[in-house]
DNA sequence: ATGAAAGCGCTAACAT
DNA sequence: ATGTTAGCGCTTTCAT
């Protein structure tokens, strides 16, 4: 064991193992790495020596010469969000099963944090990145990392003009279907709680929600477009006051839903764009003593683990969160192992789970 | 930019920057790293060259020579568990603010996965580890990594005889207090849903729960001991059928709580050892049409984000999950930067949050 | 203040 | 089948 005296950790290195086994480092490396050819007896000798010394390969050193760190970076906005958390699990499970480790970074939807995360991960020479890009703003850093040759796959949100694979769902269709369900129940006053930023709100409230589908925040944009499609197809006029985008946090949603319910003509149904927003709506109902679904129906995106245990049990459109993570990671790993093709956009199917938060509108 | 032609990524290296700036690599390194001494004009020239080439330091190479990867490994059982995920957020936030990255591994409470996770993280030369050790079994791998000189801090669970810092709460006291609250309400038939394994169950059901406090699964053990302390202090006899340990997953908890409620003399109050168990209990109540708290009271550990929105809103004993993560990470980082002291066991305070899932026992 | 040169621990030609 | 050797990109003495 080398350098035990100079204060450093007493870790055995390849030369140590080689010496003990009485072979060259090359042979030791071959035996340990299971490549090239080594006589069986030699291999055994090396393995024994490694075992005896408690040898652990230094993956960093290996990465330096092979140029591959066998690490992927995951950049998501918030691990607290059920969507990302479950996707992350899909990513890590897949990565590990293929011998990759995962470096994690939270951005809290802040562009600056996203930039620094990407930068730090680049410095660590990750072999690729799974990113859920911040909703708006400059995408230079993403363009650069792709240009530098690092494969990137986008999770959940699509970014126009970026040469990266994308994995998510068909948001526009899912939102349209969800809205149609509400419409079929007889609802006409349907509000959306998007969790978007104030800037997004400005786009939402343009006449006829024109151009929302081209919002940089593609998830919100697409879902909003799906909502608009269904509403206009039903011959309904869009009310700007039913289009909410007040921030992605739960408190924001509580405030927003309360505002909605305080309207002279409150909505009879609410479509919440993610589980945090649903939770906010539920909290508002509880605080105000508003009965759901008698007074207002609630339809949410994402089947959080608590969705069937709240009051009322929540009817949801669920995305295959874990599978989205798996698919994203697989796409990435394929690219890393050299697959060449133009960017693909995977759209996984959603599922409608009927529970008890929907009812026809009350006669008023 | 080197090797752009041989197919590798077009990343600039230190020599590239040095060449362009017309200095040696040593000077370039000094300018970039901000150490040693460099003339101001030289430094500027190097910085400009780096900027122009889009130079990103290769942290791996740096690690090789410095011996520090500025990375910590986090080994937890399941990121889906609110406790771990909030702790993880505390860990990552703290690590990042001090310039460290986080490598994540899930173990699903499986010892084998824990072993391999620790091993893989060691190979990556993490500077330290935050581990929530599997509940039972052999701890050789932990002992070894500590012996090899890698600092380790234990999250949530304590392991007897391991020279590692621990960060968690005073589980025994928290459980005793929780049980006393139930007792004060008049409950005598109080069950615990621990989420432990069948092996743990065997220890639980020994006469008078003797020796539970010495269980290898220290969280369950300590909490069970706290429960026992309160029950015996109140002069109550322990009923083995009220001591449940059927697995940590939600379905396990559902089954177990249903079994409890099917007893000839079902408990009038249940103490759930984590939020997953609480969720399971709630689901059982819902499926069986059991009214809570009228027919049975439920007191849970951990304040999950849904706790105030379920029916009934859940009364809980909450651990400062985020703060536990922060403290664990800080302990670890201090050790990494050379702090020497005998292992400490931080016990952060718990908070009791009164909501609506507790009531006096029904007259029967 | 700056440069030359020796590694960190490993892999990968190229020899033998 | 095995050994020799030259790096991977960086930091760090030791000179100058």
Image: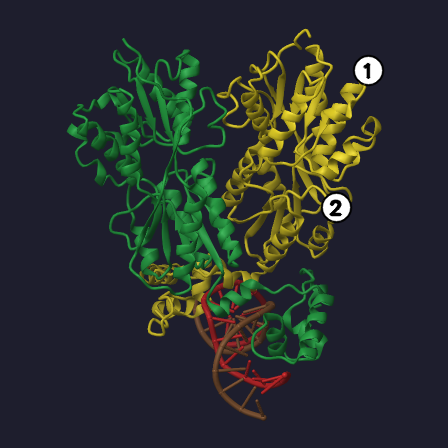
Chain colours: A green, B yellow, C brown, D red
Of the pair C4 and A262, the residue shown nearer to us: A262
Q: Chain of mark 2?
A: B
Of the pair B144 and B301, the residue shown nearer to us: B301
Q: Which residue sits at x=37%, y=47%?
A: A115
Please, is residue B134 above or below residue B56 in the view? above
**Neighbour tally class for label 1: few under 14, some 14-19, many 20 plus, Cα within 10 Å:** few
Residue A357 in sight: yes
Residue A95: give x, y in percent of width and height. Answer: 49, 54
Residue B323 in sight: no
Of the pair A92 and A362, the residue shown nearer to us: A362
Give the quarter of the image for residue B39: bottom left
Q: Which residue sits at x=39%, y=30%?
A: A316
Residue B292: give x, y in percent of width and height. Answer: 58, 15
Q: Relative to B38, is B51 on the left or the right? A: left
The secondary element bearing badge 1 is classed as loop
Please, is residue B247 above or below residue B138 in the view? above
Q: Relative to A325, is B218 on the left or the right? A: right
Please, is residue D11 above or below residue A115 in the view? below
Of the pair D10 and A288, the residue shown nearer to us: A288
Query: Which residue, given by chain and number where applicable, does mark 2 sit on?
Result: B162
Q: Relative to B263, is B232 on the left or the right? A: right
Q: CA distance from mark 2 to mark 1?
A: 36 Å
Q: Which residue sits at x=63%, y=75%?
A: A28
């Amino acid at each position: 064991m080398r350098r035990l005296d100079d204060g450093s950790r007493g870790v055995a290195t390849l030369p140590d193992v080689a010496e003990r086994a009485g072979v060259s480092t090359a042979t030791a490396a071959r035996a340990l790495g299971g490549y090239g050819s080594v006589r069986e007896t030699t291999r055994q000798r090396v393995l024994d020596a490694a075992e005896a010394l408690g040898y652990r390969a230094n993956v960093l050193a290996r990465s330096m010469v092979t140029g591959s760190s066998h690490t992927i970076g995951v950049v998501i906005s918030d691990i607290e969000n059920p969507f990302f958390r479950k996707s992350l699990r899909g990513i890590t499970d897949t990565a590990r099963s293929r011998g990759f480790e995962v470096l994690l970074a939270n951005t809290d939807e802040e562009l600056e944090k996203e930039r620094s995360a990407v930068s730090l991960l680049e410095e660590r020479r990750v072999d690729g990145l799974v990113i859920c890009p911040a909703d708006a703003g400059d995408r230079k850093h993403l363009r650069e990392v792709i240009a530098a040759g690092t494969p990137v796959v986008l999770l959940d949100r699509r970014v126009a003009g970026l040469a990266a694979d994308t994995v998510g769902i068909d948001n526009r269709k899912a939102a349209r279907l969800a809205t149609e369900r509400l419409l079929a129940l007889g609802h006409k006053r349907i509000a959306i709680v998007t969790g978007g930023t104030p800037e997004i709100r400005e786009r939402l409230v343009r006449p006829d929600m024109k151009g929302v589908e081209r919002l940089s925040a593609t998830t919100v944009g697409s879902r909003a477009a799906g909502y608009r499609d269904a509403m206009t197809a039903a011959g309904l006029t869009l009310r700007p006051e039913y289009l909410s985008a007040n921030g992605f946090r739960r408190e924001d949603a509580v405030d927003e839903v309360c505002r909605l319910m305080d309207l002279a003509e409150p909505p009879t149904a609410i479509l919440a764009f993610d589980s945090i927003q649903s939770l906010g709506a539920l909290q508002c109902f509880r605080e105000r003593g508003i009965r759901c679904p008698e007074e207002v129906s609630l339809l949410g995106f994402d089947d959080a683990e608590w969705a069937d245990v709240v009051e009322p049990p929540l009817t949801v459109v669920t995305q295959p969160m874990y599978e989205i993570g798996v698919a994203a990671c697989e796409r990435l790993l394929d690219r890393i192992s050299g697959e060449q093709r133009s960017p693909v956009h995977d759209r996984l199917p959603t599922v409608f789970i009927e529970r008890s938060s929907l009812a026809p509108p009350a006669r008023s």
